[in-house]
Image (cartoon, grey):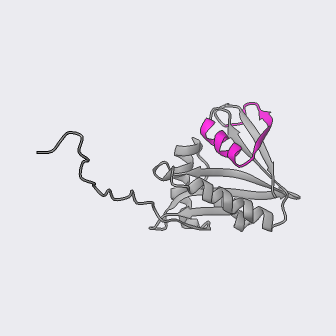
Amino acid sequence: MRCIADTAPHLTAEPFPVPEYTIRGFRSRDIPAIAEIVAEALNEHYDPSLYPSLSQQWPEGFLVLADATDRPAGFLLGVSQVAGEARVLMFAVDRRHRSHGVGSRLMDAFLERSRLRGLHRVTLEVRVSNATAIRFYTRYQFSVVDLLRGYYSDGENGYQMAREVA
């Protein structure tokens, strides 16, 4: 007979598998998956020709984090149109891959590429209602520098945020 205070047998739980990801450059075949991520995460719809067009300006600034099947799990599209400055135009993670470090890996890689390119500042825009993204950017030392009234296609305001690149 066991006493109720006895220690229960130790069960070994299998750890939850963490998906494997690879950071790579944008490829034209990524367009359908990226458009799907943009529609769900950013609530925006762009002409598919926009992605290859923007990738030509700074190919190393368009980062894709692909899962084990090479499908984009997230992406960061950055450009450098102002001397000494990078701008994050789009940044989103597929909802099925959130909380696995996808966003952090993309931002870390983008900041490093910006630094290696000799850029001194990174800017981005974010919806004022997107508290999760604002917290994420704040952890990366981005600060709000401006309020952009009616910035988004649905009329929502945005914040412009910026940080220096070390």
**Quarter of the image holding residue 108?**
bottom right
Q: Is residue 139 magenta?
A: yes
Q: Is residue 87 left or right of residue 31?
A: right
- Whole-percent x and y of residue 1? 10, 45
- Whole-percent x and y of residue 78? 72, 57
Write the start and end of the magenta stretch as one range.
Answer: 131-152
Q: Residue furthest right?
A: 83
- Whole-percent x and y of residue 116? 79, 68
Q: Is residue 106 magenta?
A: no
Whether 145 is drawn above or below 110: the answer is: above
Q: Is residue 125 left or right of residue 42?
A: right
Quadrant showing the C terminus: bottom right
Q: Is residue 132 left or right of residue 6?
A: right
- Whole-percent x and y of residue 109? 67, 63
Would you say residue 53 is visible in this rendering? no
**Quarter of the image holding residue 17?**
bottom left
